Image (cartoon, rainbow, N blue to C red):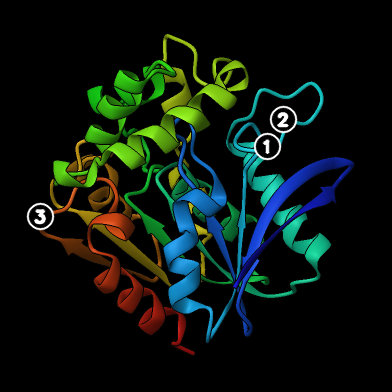
């Protein structure tokens, strides 16, 4: 069972969905308009709740978590808030799973908190040094908060367009409209600068000591395998890569059972 609550973190409210018992796992969502913690991770929380305590926040500027006063978001803000959230919740050690933008945050958090972070799973991740802004990511960030905008945006995320159901479009449209005012300030054009903000230096990546499992779709157009995941193999100390065929930017949605199995096996490693 998943429960939601608001936690005060460094004086700013953070909305958090939690479920399960056991070692803590922080789940960080991506950057698409209308994205939320529970929206991105509900199925994963349900599948892994028997073995882990899963924490899925709305990151600053998304869902029900406002930006801290004077902030416009960015890698440093999201990383510091994630670390402070886990401190506030009392978790002294935890794994981190992050999708897309959340993968970059997960890697930055592992570099900043080597004693606390035990495992890192960047999924369809951003963060590789020099990774360019793809046309698909540019389109995702630019998607208008309309039914057609939501449908087109979701179509960029998955290879199998049958997953872009009318119910999924309706839910995402509502979420995009609710957060439109704040989201407009997160990634305004020209957007290449925001993709650059979400990259990590070679020096930072080299300080990540936790084991890393990269999970990526072979047909990902938002964060292409060639520019997003493969370069990270040269910069991380303890890393392995699992590529899912017939998969776009959303492995947890497109191949949920295999994704959940991969997570369970990797997180269960000592």
* Circle 3 SS class: loop
Task: Name the quadrant of the N terminus.
Answer: bottom right
Discs 3, 1 touching: Cβ within 8 Å: no
Residue receiving disc 3:
246
Residue at horizontal 74 percent and vertical 72 percent from the top: 91
* Circle 2 SS class: loop
Discs 1, 2 touching: Cβ within 8 Å: yes
* CA distance separating discs 1 and 2: 9 Å
> Which labelled disc corresponds to residue 77?
1
110 vs 68, left or right, is left
In percent of width and height, residue 116 lies at 67, 70
Residue density around tag 1, few if under 14, some if 14–19, many if 20 or more, within 10 Å? some
Marks 2 and 3, the one that precedes in the sequence: 2
Q: Is residue 91 visible?
A: yes
How many tags in the picture? 3
In percent of width and height, residue 222 lies at 26, 35
Marks 3 and 1, the one that precedes in the sequence: 1
Q: Quadrant of residue 185?
A: top right
Residue receiving disc 2:
67
Q: Residue furthest bottom?
A: 270
Residue density around tag 2, few if under 14, some if 14–19, many if 20 or more, within 10 Å? many
């Amino acid at each position: 069972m998943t429960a939601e609550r608001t936690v005060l973190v460094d004086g700013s409210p953070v909305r958090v969905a939690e479920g399960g018992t056991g070692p803590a796992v922080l789940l960080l969502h991506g950057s698409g308009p209308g994205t939320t913690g529970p929206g991105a991770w509900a199925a994963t929380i349900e599948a892994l709740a028997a073995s882990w305590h899963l924490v899925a926040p709305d990151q600053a500027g998304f869902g029900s978590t406002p930006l801290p006063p004077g902030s416009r978001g960015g890698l440093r803000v999201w990383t510091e808030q994630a670390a402070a959230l886990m401190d506030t919740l009392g978790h002294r050690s935890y794994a981190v799973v992050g999708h897309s933008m959340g993968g970059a945050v997960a890697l930055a958090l592992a570099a900043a908190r080597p004693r606390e972070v035990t495992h890192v799973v960047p999924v369809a991740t951003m963060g590789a040094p020099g990774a360019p802004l793809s046309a698909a990511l540019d389109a995702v960030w630019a998607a208008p908060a309309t039914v057609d905008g939501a449908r087109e945006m979701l179509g960029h995320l998955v290879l199998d367009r049958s997953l872009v159901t009318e119910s999924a479009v309706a839910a995402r449209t509502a979420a995009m409209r609710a957060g439109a005012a704040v989201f407009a300030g997160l990634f305004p054009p020209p957007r290449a600068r925001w993709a650059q903000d979400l990259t990590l230096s070679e020096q930072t990546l080299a300080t990540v000591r936790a084991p890393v499992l990269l999970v990526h779709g072979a047909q990902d157009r938002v964060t292409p395998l060639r520019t997003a995941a493969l370069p990270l193999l040269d910069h991380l100390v303890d890393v392995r890569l699992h590529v899912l065929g017939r998969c776009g930017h959303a492995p947890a949605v497109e191949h949920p059972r295999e994704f959940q199995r991969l997570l369970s096996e990797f997180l269960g490693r000592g």
